[in-house]
Image (tube, helix red, strand yellow):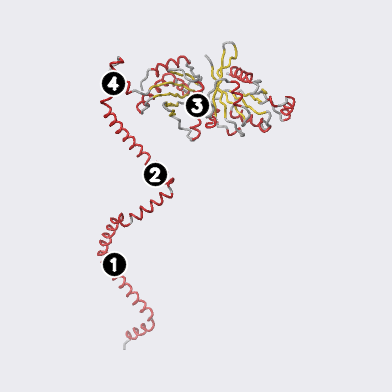
Amino acid sequence: MNEKDKIEILKDILFTDDREFEERISKRVDMLERTVNKKKQLSKKVDPLIEHQLAEFAKSIPQTLGPTITATLKEEIKNHKDEVVDALYPVLGKMVKKYVAQEMKLLSEKIDGQLGFLKSWKRKFKSIFSSKSEDQLMMDELSSAKIEQVFLIEKDSGILKAGYVKSKTIDEEMISGMFTAIKSFVEDAFEQKDQNLELIEYELYQIHIQSFVTHYIAVAISGNYSLSSKNKLQDIIFDFYHRYMAMNLDLVFDTLNAEKKIIPVRRDTLERELAQSFGNARI
Amino acid sequence: MQESKKIVILGHFGVGKTSLIRRFVSNSFSDNYKVTIGVHITKKVVEISVGKNISLILWDLEGTDDIKTIRSSYLLGTHGAVFVFDVTRPSTFQNLNDDLKITTEKLPDVPLIVVGNKVDLVDLTDLNSILKENNINSDFLSSAKTGESVEELFHKMATLLHNHA
């Protein structure tokens, strides 16, 4: 036994623990390498199977879970009707409104088609007895909304500044006050300071309200007040207001002008213009 | 051209605001909706001098025990105000000066007339001492029942408004 062998024996005796530790680590590293290799191989085989199963599961959800989900939803809706309606109304409301409008239009067209024949004969007879041409009568039928009364009202006080009426009704100044009170009440009640009451419906009459900064115009209309009538009426109102009222607003906003005097427009002038603008208007 | 002015009639519940207006205005339509929107509107043309008329648009506001709760939008554009109290019910005038202070804050620069109503139900001497005790100065003591001072108070308002303009 030479010196080298002796040293090795001595090392064996002195570092037994370290050697065992080294062997254990070596074994673990081998085991880990094998495991990783196995998982990679396993994954290659298993992944497609899992994906296929998941796809199958997704396809089968309506059959397997559908009845359970439906039953749960039914129960929830039954127990929380108001909440469900609240949540769905904004979305469904618009859809329903659009659908109903479209269906009504279709229905109306169908009825018009059915009655067209009768109507044309009725119009022919009417034309013979009324000395009006068929075209004129047709125009009369189409523009059935009629302006009955117009009020130009000071917004805050509700004081009537001018009015136009076809036939005298109850006191216009009291009506103007009531319109203003109703308008204030509704606008206050909904706490919408930037929004204005636009329409009051009363049996066969509709009152269109167009608000401006200092005044508003209320127009009482009878007959079929359609969207197209509303557009025509608004054009007339805007034209009138631009010509006879908005000139004061120019002064209000003219900061260079030191003396911001409001130009008063005489009531009789306004009433004449109201009659001219609204009296013969077709809407 | 006849001027139109907006007058608001204020006061506690049951002081006789509506009765005063009914006495003053003969033509009026149903006031059933007052319960709904809290106001009833009537009109009366008052002659303040020969050939000079003012049209008073009277806003009869629903009575309230707390004047602060009056709907502010109904007070917009007001030209004149009438504050009515009931001389037979101290609860309607005990805080009158505070109520009037709030009213003038809500309606600055607006002519205000203070009216003690139902004067036909009390002894005038007793009433005057009660009002003095409570430090109350009323412009008119009226009775919607007998008509006492009703025409006068609205005429005074019309004159005030004419001079105020």
The reply to whether label 3 and label 2 mark residues of one chain is yes
Front residue of A228 and A32: A228
- Determine the CA span between mark 4 and mark 3: 43 Å
CA distance separating discs 4 and 1: 89 Å
Tell me which amino acid carries mark 1.
Answer: Lys
**Occupied quadrant, residue A23:** bottom left
Q: Position of residue B7 (x, y in %)?
A: 57, 23
Mark 3 is on which residue type? Answer: Thr
Amino acid type, residue under disc 4 in the picture? Arg
Q: Which residue is mark 3?
A: A180
Q: Residues within 10 Å of mark 2 (few under 14, many from 20)?
A: few
Q: Which mark is residue A88?
A: 2
Could you tell me how far apart the alpha carbons at marks 2 and 1 are, in whole angstroms?
49 Å
Residue A123 tag number: 4
Residue A39 badge: 1
Q: Position of residue A8 (x, y in %)?
A: 34, 83
Outermost residue, bottom direction? Answer: A1
| Residue plotted at (67% across, 23% down) | B141
Tell me whether marks 1 and 3 sit on the same chain: yes
